[in-house]
Amino acid sequence: MLIIKKVFIFCILYCFTSPLLAVPIVANSNLKTINISAGEWPPFLSESLPHQGVVAHLIRDIFAEAGMQVNFTFLPWGRAYHDTNTGKYDATAVWMHSKERENAYYYSDVVLNERFVFFYQQKNHFDWQSIADLKGLIIGGGLSYSYGAAFDQAIENAVFALSRVGTTEQNFRRLAIGRIDVFAEEISVGYHTLNSQAPELIKDITHHSKPLLINTSFLLFPNKVEQSEKLLQIFNIHLAQFKQDGRYQAYFKGLEQGDYLPLHITK
């Protein structure tokens, strides 16, 4: 009987630790509701969009697969980061990697791939393959944002001028009247802004296919909170399953098709 018990215990442990026999982890009874802070970043995250944006939709459905409900609270970005770090929220969505954040948070696997491109007026010829091709241009950008080390160095070297304003809509309107030559923006954010805030400009503006910058963003879990490692493991396991079976890609296909536009806008 003792031998049988030992074999039984070994089998249980093996099933939970072997990568070949790993099964999805399901939350225990005191982790049924997950509270996540987020900043406004349409179409990825926004309180006013269908499903609160494509990334909120994805995160909510990933946790639902584990039997857990997600509540999103939308805050200014700095407050979302601070309040989650102090344990008020279980996680915060979504953030790029930085060494500083590693000291306070556990990073999930990649949730979002961002692709920054140059938008320009269709009537103007624009092509670029290297930073040197941007020489002499006035480029529109967002406040306090880095577009990569090579781009930042080119600004310091006065290869081109970077003119920053507070919103994506402002940059598109400046582009339309020729105040800037091109505008660097994440492609989904750019087209979402055109469709929802400046639809009259859509026919006149396009983008260059070469990406300026590829970023990845993550769901962050505060490392001071005891349950964070468990939630991280749950999330990563189910995120991987979504990616493997094609469900992950379907959310972003829906984004391209206009599924996350404000409800008053016709696709």
Image (cartoon, grey):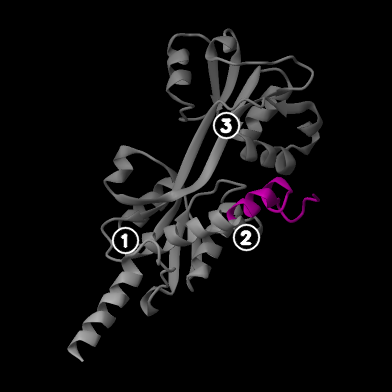
Q: Is residue 107 left or right of residue 204?
A: left
**Residue 215 image offset from top left, x and y in percent:** 49, 36
First along the sequence among labels 2 and 1: 2
Count neighbours of disc 1 (C-alpha within 10 A) and say few if under 14, some if 14 to 19, many if 20 or more: some
Q: Is residue 101 magenta?
A: no
**100 or 193: which is nearer to us?**
100
Determine which quarter of the picture holds residue 230: bottom left
Q: Which residue is mark 2?
A: 51
**Residue 245 image offset from top left, x and y in percent:** 58, 58
Q: Is residue 259 magenta?
A: yes
Q: Which residue is mark 1?
A: 229
**Which residue does the image show at 53% across and 41% down from the upper left?**
113
- From this viewpoint, is residue 89 visible? no
**Residue 33 image offset from top left, x and y in percent:** 44, 72
Looking at the rendered image, the quarter that the N terminus falls into is: bottom left
Q: What segment is highlighted magenta in the picture? A: 248-267
Q: Name the kind of residue labelled 2 in the image.
A: His
Q: Give the structural element (helix, strand or loop) at label 3.
A: strand
Q: Which residue is mark 3?
A: 116
Q: Name the kind of residue labelled 3 in the image.
A: Phe
